[in-house]
Amino acid sequence: MASDTIVALSSGGLPAAIAVIRTSGPAALAAAQSVAGKPPTPRRATLRSLRNPADGALIDRAVLLFFPGPDSATGEDIVEYQCHGSKAVVSALIAALIAQPGMRTAEPGEFTRRALSNGRIDLTQAEGLAELLEAESEAQRISALRRAEGSLRTEVERWRATLLMLSAEAEVAIDYSDEEDGAHKFEPAERVSTLVAALDTLLSAPRVERLRDGVRIVVAGPPNAGKSSLVNALAGQIRAIVTAIPGTTRDLIEIPLSIAGIPMTLVDTAGLRATDDEVERIGIDLAKREIERADILLWLGADLDRPAHPRSLLIATKADLQVGVGHSVSTVTSHGVDDLKSLIADMALDVVPSTEQLGLNAREAELVEQCRQALLRSVEVNDPVLIAEELRLARSALDRVSGIRGVDQLLDALFSRFCLGK
């Protein structure tokens, strides 16, 4: 299938002012000549009349762009057609292209997969592109763009170069292990320590999944403490029922929102109290579980009753009626609501990567940890053969981070998230 030339619509939904149709592969230029006549000049926008090779009928007038491989996005010859964005024009052009020898419709993510196979990007960049396509908040966009642009790839390549040098020295030490003068004694401890410190820094940073899934903000406390009113104030709309009747909220209410560009999920919970009401008791059990799951806990009860949590804020609601202990908020006058949002955003930085931080996803973190453990083991032994083996295991883990080997099933799952034209 890699020898096929693929074609797909790469722009958004139709109809639109302009549609971009992309082709990539060995027959891309020949197909362009069949529908447009004279081949386009490389890397120069060219206006052409597009005709169906079967009968010469005019399809559209479009701008063509030709990017010769291997210096293209996929590493192959690419021709892009910028035509009018009607469904009829796009369907007619794609049908005419697919009718050419060696052409077929692209699979989801196949353009990016070819870029990975041809070394134009690595797996960390491909995952960054997937995150960028799905980004809904500013923080998601910035993080995904950094990864797609190769920030993690650069680090991994630097670490891999260090490991290759250490492995080469280990092999030399093995060859000269029988010599008694010690001229080829191998002592990697200092360089390994420096590399482990760099890995530790990256592993200690928040994971990028939190940017995708959102920081979980749980509002909890006793009945009638103002939890639902606070949830509505933070959400900027009425989403939770507010009454003077204790136990109104019995189920979880989840509200997606963005604060300071950070995606979050705001969770309203049942008031915590002793009750004989079976339905309310189920809601209270759910509330207790949510407190344990919370990334940030907003506690509206007494400070003595506040659950142990690494990131919690004591909230004193109804500030228009009374003075309380904790961050003062009035959902009636909106006093303190903006300040509370700022506090939440500051605490969320402990959970999500900042715009300056390089974050790992769960897959990458597991492999980097495997690399780290192999490096730690390498300095615990004196035999150069054993050291070389541990360095090989460390390199293997890094290779899987960047997708050099052992990731076929992962690639199938990853690229299925992409659209046809990506």
Image (tube, rainbow, N blue to C red):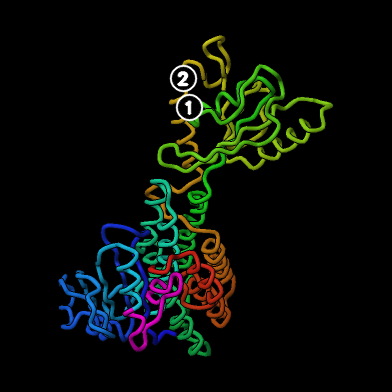
Mark 1 lies on residue = 340
Q: Residue at x 61, y 32 (%)?
A: 268
**Residue 334, label in figure:** 2
Let me know if residue 251 is in the magenta part. no
| Figure disc tally | 2
Q: Residue at x 53, y 74 (%)?
A: 407
Tag 2 secondary structure: loop
Residue 225 on image: x %, y %: 64, 20
Q: Residue at x 77, y 36 (%)?
A: 282
The residue nearer to you, when weighing 274 against 98, is 98
| Quarter of the rendering containing residue 75 | bottom left
- Magenta stretch: give its range: 96-115
Q: Is residue 226 above or below residue 155?
A: above
Residue 86 on image: x %, y %: 31, 62
| Quarter of the rendering containing residue 14 | bottom left
- On the rendered structure, is 404 left or right of 158? right
Among numbered discs 1 and 2, the one appearing first in the sequence: 2
Labels 1, 2: front one: 2
Residue 335 on image: x %, y %: 46, 18
The residue nearer to you, when weighing 31 against 260, is 31
Task: Tell me which amino acid carries mark 1.
Answer: Leu
Q: CA distance from mark 1 to mark 2?
A: 10 Å
Q: Is residue 44 above or below residue 262?
A: below
